């Protein structure tokens, strides 16, 4: 999933000239890597604080599933990158379906392997999706609407949660 994430990052449109392309790629890479890192930090600290025993009794780091959280973060960020690409909508839908199918298959494989309970992977998926969405959409200035209406705006630009942060 990580490889797909990095490939999607490279495939997103980023500017017409070399300097704007480079600046956009660096900004996107920094923001998306920060999202992945923050997600890992939250999950790791949660596992330490909660101390839930794994189904196979190997340790007390079962809840939430870090593998599910990381896969969800990569799938969410890859999906954001796919949505920004200049490709037909059916291709975007197909790619996104593949990303989320792989994410859920990875999470369920952790349950089948006896490493996690279903609640562990569901919590991991939720944390991974939430943290990566908030960080990416806030710092990348992604437009977002709920039922066709802007969530918030800043200087006339519709934003995800109303932060006016720009690099």
Image: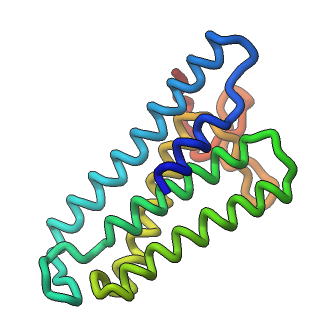
How many numbered circles are shown? 0
Judge whether 24 appears above or below 137 on screen. above
Query: Residue 128: where, in percent of width, then height?
Result: 44, 60
Q: In this view, does 148 lie to the left or right of 143?
A: right
Name the colouring of the figure. rainbow
Q: Which of 48 and 7 is in front in this view?
A: 7
Residue for point 75% across, 16% down: 16
Return the x and y of residue 86 as percentages of the image width and height. 81, 39
Q: Which of 11 and 79 is in front in this view?
A: 11
The structure residue drawn at horizontal position 45% and vertical position 69%, both measured from the top left corner, is: 125
Task: From this view, report whether residue 44 is shown above or below residue 35.
Answer: below
User: 158 and 131: which one is in front?
Assistant: 131
Q: Which residue is drawn at 46% across and 51% down?
A: 2
Residue 39: where, in percent of width, then height? Answer: 36, 53
The answer to whether residue 72 is above or below residue 54 is: above
In this rendering, position of residue 16 left or right of residue 142: right
> Which quadrant of the view contains residue 138?
top right
In this view, 19 is above or below 37:
above
- In this view of the protein, which residue sits in the foreground, 157 or 130? 130
Which x, y percent locates residue 81? 64, 44
């Amino acid at each position: 999933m990580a490889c797909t994430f990095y490939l999607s990052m490279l495939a997103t449109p980023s500017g017409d000239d070399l300097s704007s392309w480079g600046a956009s790629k660096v900004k996107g890479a920094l923001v998306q890597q920060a999202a992945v890192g923050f997600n890992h930090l939250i999950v790791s600290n949660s596992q330490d604080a909660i101390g839930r025993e794994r189904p196979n009794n190997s340790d007390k780091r079962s809840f939430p599933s870090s593998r599910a959280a990381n896969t969800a973060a990569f799938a969410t960020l890859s999906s954001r990158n796919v949505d920004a690409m200049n490709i037909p909508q059916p291709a975007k839908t197909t790619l996104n379906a593949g990303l989320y199918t792989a994410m859920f298959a990875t999470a369920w494989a952790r349950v089948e392997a006896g490493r996690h309970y279903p609640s562990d992977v569901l919590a991991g998926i939720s944390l991974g999706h939430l943290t990566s969405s908030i960080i990416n959409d806030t710092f990348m200035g992604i437009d977002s609407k709920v039922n066709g209406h802007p969530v918030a705006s800043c200087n006339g630009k519709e934003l995800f949660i109303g932060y006016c942060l720009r690099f």
